[in-house]
Amino acid sequence: VLTSCGTCREGIRNYRLKSLETRQVEFQDVVQFVIQQGKGGFGQGPEQLLYHAACHHEWTGVAPLKAGEIYASELGKMVGSQVAISPHCCGESGLGALTSPKIYNRLRLRKKEQLSSDLSGYPSDSPVIVGCPSCKIGISRTLLEMGVKREVVHTLEFLARLRHGDTWRKDFHKQLAKAAVQNEVQTLTRIP
C-alpha cells in the first residue's frame, strides 16, 4: 500500500481492512517506492533543496529518527541536489492544534525561527519540499505569517514537475479523464 503521507500510512495500517487481513501487506511512502525501484528520469534538480522532515516519518523500515536523513539523502541522489533538512514540527497536526493550541503555537513559533535561519542564503526561486500534505499547509501558513513568498511543494509534486514540466498537473488530469474505469477505479498505466 503506497501513500504520500506518513500519518495516513499509519492510520491505514491500523484499520484492519478485511482485504488486507489475509495477506502480508507492506506499507510504504510512494517516493521511497519510486527511489527503491530505481525509477529515474527526473532530470537535474536545483543545486540546493530545503526539506522539512515530517513528524510521522515518510521513509519506512528504518529507525524513525534516521528516516528524515535517509529520505533527504536519497532524494538528493535521485535529483542531483544537496538537500538540507529543516528540523522541528510545523505544528499542523490534525487534532493536536485544536486540542492543545498553546503547545502547537509554541511549536509553530520554533518552526518559524528555524525557517528564518534555514531560508537565509537559500535561493529565493527554490521551493521548500515536504513529504506530508499537512506539513505543506503548516509550512505554507508559517511562511505567510513571516511575509515570505516561497513555494511549498510535496516531494511528489516536485518530482512530477522535474519529470513532466510545469504543466504536469493539467496533463495528468487530461490523462486521468481518458483512463479506463474498472470497479469504480480509474487506472493510468503510463503518464507520457
Image (cartoon, grey):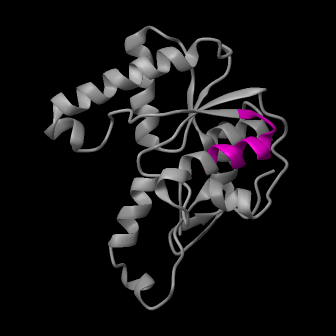
Percent x, y of residue 97: 23, 36
Q: Position of residue 165 (x, y in %)?
A: 77, 34
Q: Which residues are magenta?
A: 71-82
Instruction: Please determine whether, in this image, residue 52 is positioned above or below residue 178.
Output: above
* Residue 171 appears in the picture as rendered: no
The vertical placement of 112 against 14, above or below, is above
State how many labels appear.
0
Q: Is residue 45 left or right of residue 169?
A: right
Residue pictured at 42% horizontal, 15% vertical:
144
Q: Residue at x 69, y 45 (%)?
A: 73
Could you tell me what secondary structure mostly forms the magenta stretch?
helix
Res 84 seen here: yes
- Residue at 39% in and 63% down: 10
Residue 42 in magenta stretch: no
Q: Nearer the viewer, residue 169 or 79?
A: 79
Is 86 or 101 nearer to us in this picture?
86
Residue at figure coordinates x 43%, y 84% from the top left: 19
The stretch drawn in magenta includes residue 76: yes
Name the image quarter holding residue 76.
Answer: top right
